[in-house]
Image: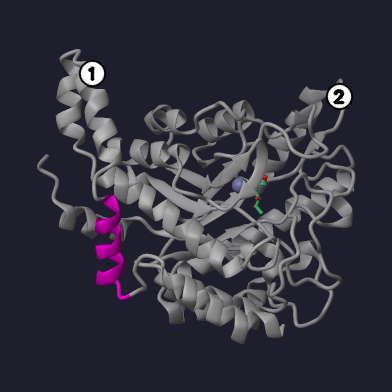
Amino acid sequence: MGIDTDKAIARMKDVKISLHCWQTDDVGGFEKPDSTLGGGGIQCTGNYPGKSRSIAEMKTDLEKAMSLLPGKQRLNLHAIYGDFGGELVDRDQIEIKHFQGWIDWAKNQGIGLDFNASCFSHPKSDDGFTLSSKNEAIRQFWVEHVKRCRIIAAEMGKQLGTPCVHNIWIPDGSKDMPVDRLGHRAILKKSLDEIFAVPYSKEYIKDAIECKLFGIGSEAMVVGSHEFYLGYALKNNTLLCLDNGHFHPTEQVADKISSCLLYIDELLLHVTRGIRWDSDHVVTFNDEIILIAQEVIRCNALDRVNVGLDFFDGSLNRIGAYVVGTRAAQQAFLFALLEPTELIKKYEEAGKNFERLAYLESMKTMLFGAVYDKYCLDSNVPVGVDYIAEIQKYEEEILLKR
Ligand code: RNT
Ligand code: ZN
């Protein structure tokens, strides 16, 4: 079919997946008092032993995960993961100094950082509204938090020489039918305007906003809906974050990519796997993720699409979860890079739809696994199932001793 597998492997250097730090500790964070997930429209279930309890443990876990992955990754931090030195530092007080240790570590690892404001797991998010709150003191508290997060993100990008994607996701919404949807959305718009009023160089920070259809406790309305953020991103020139767990289960996020890319400079993808709802299961090499990767590659948009993982499962070895999930996402991109797109397009344009289907089907049974194995081999990381034993060893020696 004229596919150069070495070239496809070489192109994988442009697929930099941002590892979400929150799979190591079930979105707990290192604040005092403990900011265990709650009141935020997201859930983590499972109680597998070995969750990371400190920045040091988290770094060890991430280093282990990255040592089992081909290529280079990035790290995606949430604001609750700062180094607060055992002190109570509220969200409207966080500073660069709380993240300098992470920046130094990332520099050492030769990787970039991404960042997220944490507008959940906090007494001031308990009633379900943060940036769209009608309580002005609460709204201002969260505006201040996100403003500080952007300062920190820009500094991360500056020090590391690679722009930091700063993503805003808020849980705001309502369990039952509100009568003032417009009111909350107007407040969210106002808060975002205040947050983005401070300009930073795109070389340091890329601002993204993430929509959602519904969450636990926000079934009847999510303030930051798809239409809300799509409109905001278009008008204000921000990135749009598409999380494939955040739409109706039969809706294809892949199909949104080409449309968005016609109007928006860059996208952020939150790659996850929903089962019946936004359950944030470990990513697997499934049809949904393959179609997403194919769309990015077919649009020739690797340089305009930032890829981050977003799953959290506490019911299995968490390092294993990283490796399986990241490899699955990588596999989707490599699979897409191996497609004879131009050839298939010719059949498509000639109205030869049987031939198109036959090529797409035959791709699935080709020796794709061998190409991914070669990518692992070239990168000097375990091939095939060999990483399982490494993770079992790590579990025995490190995780079970926590
Ligand atoms: C929640 C969003 C959001 C979070 C992380 C922790 O539904 O997907 O991205 O999962 O920020
Ligand atoms: Zn997400």
Which residue in the protein does label 2 denote? 178
| Res 97 → quadrant | bottom right
Residue 65 in sight from this viewpoint: yes
**SS label for mark 2:** loop
| Res 34 → quadrant | bottom right
At x 73%, y 32%, the residue is 223
**SS label for mark 1:** helix
Left or right, residue 366 beside residue 224: left
Q: Can you give x and y, in whole percent of width and height, for residue 171 in the image?
A: 75, 43
Which residue in the protein does label 1 denote? 354
Label 2 or label 1, whichever comes before in sequence order: 2
At x 53%, y 31%, the residue is 235
Choose between 167 and 293: the one closer to the eye: 293
The magenta span reads 368-380
Q: Is residue 128 above or below residue 167?
A: above
According to the image, what is the colour scheme of the structure?
A: one colour
Q: Is residue 378 magenta?
A: yes
Pair 2/1: label in front: 1
